[in-house]
């Protein structure tokens, strides 16, 4: 199979695309993959590092208020469509897959106009503007959350697939996870993470939480700050406690996230779609702190889908405090019954076969 992947801006758009590409390569060895993304987005660094061919297309998003900048955006979109057509004619893909972000717009639109089969994947419970626009042109719209299906009522074909990032974590080994952390097998692990770049609100509350961790000496806390926040957060932590609690491990970034998730008794973090896909695939209980700084407040909608079935608890950022978070963590960690109930509920939402479902659909639309 010759496949073009496109999606960018955040890891939440990039990693699902890469998961689909990985599944294609596993099912059809020798497949050729081209990734089209923004020259300034995270994808311009992440994708080439994976050994995947990358081509840039310049595009920006629309402003929500009327402005002359939107006129320039339309011009860039049309230019991006022409550039995308050139790339697609040269690569000759069997199918084009878009996973969100502004760059998907010209690429999927160009593919549709060239008669190339297309699939778009919506990660969030609240559908993004780009995917809603593209849904009238795509051969299939796949969604991570059932709640998003209603946003694509005019699409040719919709499919509830879950998020393909779920597929990547299910093979993670617990033995490697404990080894990575340097803790004995079977240890209780609480992971606190604010996403790949970190989250200031979670870092701030962790400084307040740190002095209380000695009250839970049998629990190993892993705190991931994000690289840009690491030095400042470490300085504040050392100011809050004379020395870091022995059961606290602070890291700027976690390179083996899947393995650590596999051994986590509880995860505290944001509610990006890819993260939730991983948690539900593994059945990990969670305390979710949705970012309020996202389009249409979609992280809160994502989180509610887990809260509603009992898989997670949610704390809104405006209500967050060290004492409240400690109370919630302690309640869950000290109740095996609560952990088991949350884990079972999370698994009911998990779709570890997500990437395979999507690739199966790709085979259908290319065959038809």
Image (tube, rainbow, N blue to C red):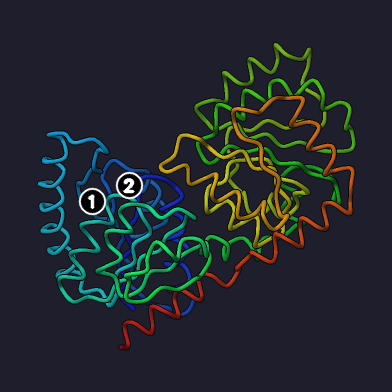
Q: Which mark is residue 126?
A: none
The image quadrant where one finds the C terminus is bottom left
Name the residue at the bottom extreme. Answer: 368
Along the line of sight, which residue is nearer the eye, 251 or 304? 304
Locate residue 189 relative to residue 58 in the image: left or right: right
Residue 112 coordinates in the image, percent (x, y): 20, 70
Task: For the residues labelled 1 and 2, say whether their Cβ atoms are less than 8 Å apart.
Answer: yes
Which badge, 1 or 2, is on the more N-terminal residue? 2
Residue 215 coordinates in the image, percent (x, y): 89, 27
Q: Which residue is mark 2?
A: 44
Q: Residue at x 50, y 27 (%)?
A: 228
- 323 w.r.t. 155: above or below: above
Q: How many marks?
A: 2
Q: Residue at x 55, y 51 (%)?
A: 302
Locate residue 307 relative to residue 183 in the image: left or right: left
Q: Residue at x 15, y 53 (%)?
A: 80
Q: Which residue is mark 1?
A: 56
Along the line of sight, which residue is nearer the eye, 286 or 153? 153
Tell me the CA gap for discs 1 and 2.
8 Å
Locate residue 116 relative to residue 336 in the image: left or right: left
Label 2 secondary element: helix
Q: Residue at x 76, y 41 (%)?
A: 190
Label 1 secondary element: strand
């Amino acid at each position: 199979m010759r496949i073009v992947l496109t999606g960018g801006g955040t890891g939440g758009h990039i990693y699902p695309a890469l998961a689909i590409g990985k599944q294609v390569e596993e099912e059809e060895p020798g497949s050729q993959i081209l990734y089209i993304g923004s020259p300034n987005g995270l994808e311009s660094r992440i994708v080439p590092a994976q050994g995947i061919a990358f081509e840039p297309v310049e595009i920006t998003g629309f402003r929500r208020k009327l402005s002359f900048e939107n006129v320039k955006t339309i011009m860039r979109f049309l230019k991006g469509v022409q550039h995308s057509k050139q790339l697609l004619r040269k690569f000759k893909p069997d199918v084009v897959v878009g996973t969100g972000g502004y760059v998907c717009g010209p690429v999927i639109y160009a593919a549709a106009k060239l008669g190339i089969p297309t699939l778009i994947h919506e990660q969030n419970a609240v559908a993004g503007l780009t995917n809603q626009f593209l849904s009238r042109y795509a051969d299939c719209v796949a969604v991570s959350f059932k709640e998003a299906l209603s946003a694509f009522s005019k699409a040719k074909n919709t499919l509830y697939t879950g998020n393909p990032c779920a597929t990547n974590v299910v093979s993670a080994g617990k033995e490697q996870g404990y080894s990575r952390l340097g803790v004995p097998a079977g240890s209780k692990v609480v992971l606190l993470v604010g996403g790949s770049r970190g989250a200031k609100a979670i870092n701030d509350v962790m400084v307040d939480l740190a002095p209380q961790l000695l009250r839970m000496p049998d629990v190993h806390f892993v705190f991931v700050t994000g690289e840009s926040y690491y030095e400042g957060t470490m300085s504040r932590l050392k100011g809050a406690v004379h020395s870091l609690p022995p059961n606290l491990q602070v890291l700027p970034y976690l390179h083996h996230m899947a393995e650590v998730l596999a051994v986590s008794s509880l995860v505290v973090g944001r509610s990006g779609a890819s993260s939730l896909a991983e948690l539900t695939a593994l059945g990990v209980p969670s305390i979710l702190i949705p970012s309020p700084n996202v389009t249409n407040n979609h992280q809160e909608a994502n989180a509610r889908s887990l809260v509603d079935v009992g898989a997670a608890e949610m704390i809104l950022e405006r209500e967050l405090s060290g004492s409240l978070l400690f109370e919630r963590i302690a309640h869950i960690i000290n109740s095996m019954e609560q952990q088991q109930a949350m884990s079972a509920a999370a698994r009911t939402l998990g779709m570890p076969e997500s990437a395979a479902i999507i690739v199966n659909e790709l085979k259908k639309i290319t065959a038809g």
